[in-house]
Image: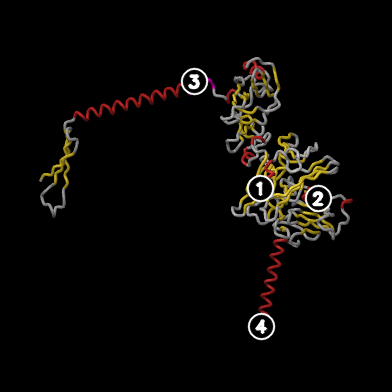
Amino acid sequence: MKKNTWLWLWLLLIHVVFFISKTVKTHGAAAVDTISVNNSLSGDQTIISKGQVFELGFFKPGKSSNYYIGMWYKNVSEATYVWVANRDQPVLDRFKSVLTISDGNLVLFNESNSSIWSTNLVNSEKSSLVGVSALLQDDGNLVLTHGSDNSSNPLWQSFEHPAHTWLPGSKIVLDKRTNISQKLISWKNKDDPAPGLFSLELDPNRSKSYIIMWNQTKKYWSSGPWNGQIFSGVPEMRVNYIYNFSFYDDVNQSYFYYTTYPNSPISRFIMDMSGQIKQLNWLTATKQWFLFWSQPRQQCDVYALCGSFGVCNENSLPYCSCMTGFEPNSQKDWDLEDFSGGCKRKTILQCGNSSIANAKVKSDKFLEQENVELPENSQTVVGGSGKECQSACLNDCSCTGYSFDNGSCSIWSADHVLNLQQYSDSNSNGKTINIRLAASELPSPKSNKTKIIGIIVGAVVGVLFLFLVAILITLKKRKTSKVEGAYCLFHRVVNESEFKDSEQHFKCLVTDSEQHFKCLTTD
């Protein structure tokens, strides 16, 4: 009996040790949802919000070899990252890197023990260096608190420093005192969460509307002003069976705020790397994200989506392609659906190039691109005809392309053409632009003539061949009709044991009059 008691105690001890080791391996010394002074994150350790909604730790996006501190949904089967700390400062070794509390801040140290990201609270903002901790909440807010202070009065919170995702319960604020607006900024590409070219913010001009910016310099979409119920340019907001929203505005700040109703699906709002804002809902049954709405509605309405000398086409996938005579600046980026780098010339121009000016190289030519939306930033020059407009561009080595329309000559002088869109055949609103290319990039008139001659010769040969076949068939039929009869004799030797010394002879006679076979059997 005593021996059995010791055995049970020993087994119990083993289970306790195993449970503790597993907990430490998963969460380190940190509490489940908290990072504190003595409890940090490293390697594969994570913290998880109390209700098992969000998880925070190191992650590696796509095929990248870099690691980031980020936050994702705990119970969504598709890896979906909603916040990234060190967006443009990745680490290479997550096991030698650590996220910890240091000097009253939440700090990320890389494999070289260098601080690469921090909450950056100054001394005046830190009431004490003791008792500071970071808590991951079920709403996706990572809050830095002090001592007994609860999360309602945090020292710092991730909701005030969003990445590319706007979660329910958070807000994108315009501070009227500083005229600085918080921004949602897209990822660079699928493998890189670094800030991309597209951002969403509340209009600093206080129009009570949200705007999307390209490179933080060019506005290409607006929600329209808040009319007391919805943003005038987003009629989808009237379908509010999922969302509860409101707009707040006072002398100090303005912001839009939304939440989801109880039992609604998981929802998130993102500034996508495509240049569109998107509202997505998680469908548990199909285990995939469902696009609720997006703006701008047309992908090609995104400014400069395809970069310099790129062409956007709503009727093709991918939407972007390079013009004839051009190729992607970075094929790797294009494969990751980052087209912002645009296209480069395959062959340098003859005009203005001293290295080939005296060589036997033909002058530059122009490629006509029809039914397109013309790029911006053109210059109007004197040109009373299409030929004069072409000459004006050809004689200016800085001229990239020209367009002559309704008696007006427009040229583009910079060595880039942005926001070029190809319209479909059913849309006749497009114009024609002529892009300057090296002569070698265009087929020569001689080669075109050769191709035309080849097509004509091929067609003639084909017709003659069919005519010859028709004659041969006709002659064969006539020859067959003149044959009065034909016979064929088949010999089949049967089993010798049954038909000794005998044969069966089959004669088949074809006659003109009856047009059928007669079979005669002879001994």
Q: Residues within 10 Å of mark 3 (few under 14, many from 20)?
A: few
State yes or no: residue 446 in magenta.
yes
**Closer to the camera, 17 or 277?**
277
Say the numbered circle drawn on residue 280: 1
Spatial separation of the CA atoms under disc 4 and disc 1: 61 Å
Q: Secondary structure at mark 2?
A: loop
Span of residues in magenta? 444-451
Residue 442: x %, y % from top left: 57, 24
Spatial separation of the CA atoms under disc 2 and disc 4: 57 Å
State yes or no: residue 430 in magenta.
no
Say the numbered circle drawn on residue 3: 4
Residue 469: x %, y % from top left: 32, 27
Say the numbered circle drawn on residue 449: 3
Q: Secondary structure at mark 1?
A: strand
Tell me what residue is drawn at x 64 percent, y 35 percent.
Answer: 300
Q: Earlier in the sequence, mark 3 or mark 1?
A: 1
Kind of residue at badge 4: Lys
Looking at the image, how many numbered discs can be counted on the residues?
Answer: 4
**Closer to the camera, 484 or 194?**
484
Q: Using the image, determine if residue 279 lies above or below residue 11.
A: above
Q: Residues within 10 Å of mark 4 (few under 14, many from 20)?
A: few
Residue 297: x %, y % from top left: 65, 38
